[in-house]
Image: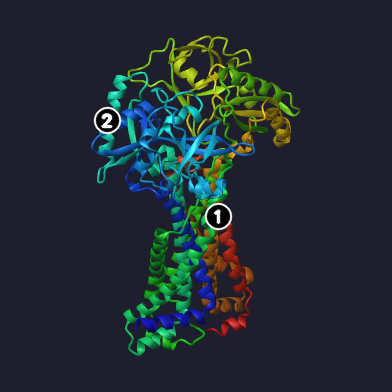
Amino acid sequence: MITQDLRYGWRQMVRRPGITIAAVLTLGLGIGANVTMYSWLDGRLRGLLTAVDRPDLFVALNGTSRTRSDLSTSYPDFVDFRQRRPDTVDDLIAYTLVPMNMRTTGDPVRVFGEIVSGNYFDVLGVRAALGRTFRPDEVTVTNRNPVVVISRNFWQRRLGGKPSVVGETLTLNGRAFTIVGVTGEGFHGTEPYLNLDLWVPMSMQPAVMSGGDRLTARGQYWLEVLVRLKPGVRLSRAEADLELIARDLAAAYPDAASRGVKLYELWRAPTTGGAAVTAVMGVQLGVAGIVLLIACANVANLLLASAVTRQRETAVRLTLGASRSRLVQQLLTESTLLALAGGLAGVAIAYATKDVVRVFIPPAPLPIELNPTLNGAAVIFAAAVTIATALIFGLVPALQGSAASVVTSLKESATSITATPRRARLRKGLVIAQVALSLVLLISAGLFVRTLLNAQSVDPGFSTRNGLLAAVDLLPAGYDAPRGRVFQQQLLSDIRAIPGVDAASFVDRVPLGFGGQSSIRISVDGYTPAPNEEMLVFWSRIGSGYLRTMGIRVVEGREFTDRDSDARGDVAVVNETLARRYFGGRSPVGGRLRIGPRTLEVVGVAGDGKYTSITESPHAVLYAPGPQWYRPDVVLTIKTSGDPTAVLPALQAAVRRLDVNIPLFDVRTIAEHLEISVFVQRMLASLLGAFGMLAVLLATVGLYGVIAAIAVQRTPEIGMRMALGARARDIVALILRQAFGMIGIGLAAGLLMALGVTRLFKGLLVGVAATDALSFTLTTALLFVVALAASYLPARRAASIDPLLALRHE
């Protein structure tokens, strides 16, 4: 029987190519959008650790204070946590991302790797495809065993995939490292969405990372930590156990250790973008679901319209003894075939669009790699969506189509069959639902378009837009602190002399970049902290003239000059938030604050800005002069009067004149850098805008079809009215009144739904309320105009028919 139904359903699809093509394309778009969004979300939830043994057992550990729960960890703290780990914890690993210069036969090239704890590969369960990973004796003594494990991708891309690579040397940051192993395919490290090149043991930190020996500094938070739980252990229990250790460390080292710990599932850990990134993808999947509902309503309307022309067939089959359940089965089989075809089309569309996410990757000096895949989970999801779709759009038309009146249907002529009032009401209800859901999507898209515009116009705290950023690292060339200071100051002097350069300086971390900002604990003379208050602030090491170069306001006092060198007393500039919080209304200029044993005099107050995110609340920030807090790796900041790229050749020449072994890396314009801060808003605005337009298109088609059907059903009435003197505009108004009823109800329902839905993502909005009146008004007006146009065309056609022809239908 099912075989017979399938054959008959296939013949029906072939017999009605217009309806079939329209239904399959509509369903394909809806299903494809959902499968694409699901593949992105699934990749987010599953792909944070790849080629790792039992990734479900790993959670992220962060330190906590009174105001923050996203602190990194110092190496001594990590060692204590690992040595004292409770029974609920299998082990812990530590790592941090480090860019390095690799010297080959030509100019140095930039590579990205991780400094990792000695147990890194063992705990992750990662085995070397060639050679081995680190031995215990190689990771215990600082700076003694320069060994490196490289990735398979790096081995093939940079080293030609030579089988003899194990035992060869790489020159990293001026130090020769012996390659001891190559990882297997698929392992990219523990930095999400980055395709890393290599890994060096923690014991080699001083050789590849600036800032001196950090392995004994308990007060320096620079490591990310992953915890491998014992199987079956709940996260909350392990967190409570580790919290006891954290309290002991805080009591033993009150000036160094963090106050507590927080464990996160990887998908919501601060180091992976936190729950906000998952929320963004969840919003996109929810929006795609609404598009699918609109598509289902559209196809249901098509099938209801088709059912009108099949009333005689249904009546004949009932007369010949077919049961209603048998007819429902047949009609559901036809719907299922359409859904399967739509599902196949959807998977094809998803395969073609899965990589669209790469379009939104901002320019960044990192090896970002996103590879969404249609894996088994995505295929299962596609199958589930297809089955649900078949039921959603097929069940009601099947029930309606099998409920034909035998007597009435057989009495009707083949040309005068019309929809029953009940079926007409159902079709109108589906159109109302389409209009309502389309309005929800349009309002959501409007909010995120305004969010993008606001985010782009938000004052990040610096006004310079014409300029260049370029990284320079003196560590690989063997510069010590005295020589490095001289090099940096001479380089700034030479850059400032380049035609077209208005100002130049440097900074250790550019605001609003990847990687966040560094934090440091301070104390302020004259300020008494509250019990357990954590005086932890962001801080940046900057060159002379940095505030002027970046266009940061100097509210009070002065900024750093070339005279603020290592030979003078320590000085600092604070931002407005730090001044308000710790100086209690008094002028900070001339005040003193302390970092460890060093005392700094405040010489200026800078305006507030955005440092890690365009949506963040104000942070307390301290600026320290680079010469007094030297580090060999800095980012040059150059303000130009014209095209920033025009000064790049002169900039490169200035660096080469001082030292041909010092390359420039990560060169980009300030405008390109700012794209990093708004890429989430840009992605949401673009995708929601596309989904909104697709929803409007589907709703418009559905509305057009229903109004056209209404006009056909009222053809005899229209002919009578015209014969009695009605004009064309009277007929148009007659049809439009029915359309206005559906449009008005749909818009009202959509506004109510939008008021509830938009509140769910208010945390993602910038400078606009979730109930923004302008967005609601403009999108409602837009949808009304589009719906009116969709209704006017069939109404106008109905008004142009010949009255005599219309009366023949009577």
| Label 1 CA crowd tier, 10 Å (few <14, some 14–19, many 20+) | some
Question: Residue at 61% of width from left, 83% of height from top?
Answer: 804
Q: What colouring style does the render use?
A: rainbow
Q: Is residue 722 above or below residue 506?
A: below
Coordinates of residue 197 in the picture (x, y in percent): 51, 42
| Contact check, label 1 and label 2, Cβ < 8 Å | no
- The three-letter amino acid code for the residue at tag 1 is Ala
Q: Quadrant of residue 63?
A: top left
Q: Nearer the viewer, residue 641 or 802?
A: 641
Q: Residue furthest bottom?
A: 320
Coordinates of residue 244 in the picture (x, y in percent): 26, 29
Q: Secondary structure at mark 2?
A: loop
Residue 689 relative to residue 307: left or right: right
Q: Which residue is mark 2?
A: 84
Q: Secondary structure at mark 1?
A: helix
Q: Is residue 740 visible?
A: no
Q: Quadrant of the N terminus?
A: bottom left
Q: Which residue is mark 1?
A: 690
Q: Nearer the viewer, residue 163 or 585?
A: 163
The CA distance from mark 1 to mark 2 is: 53 Å
Q: Is residue 476 above or below residue 325?
A: above
| Label 2 CA crowd tier, 10 Å (few <14, some 14–19, many 20+) | few
Marks 1 and 2, the one that precedes in the sequence: 2
Residue 472 relative to residue 341: left or right: right
Q: Is residue 35 above or below residue 391?
A: above
Q: Is residue 522 visible?
A: yes
- The three-letter amino acid code for the residue at tag 2 is Arg
Closer to us: mark 1 or mark 2?
A: 2
Coordinates of residue 711 in the picture (x, y in percent): 55, 73
Q: Nearer the viewer, residue 502 or 712?
A: 502
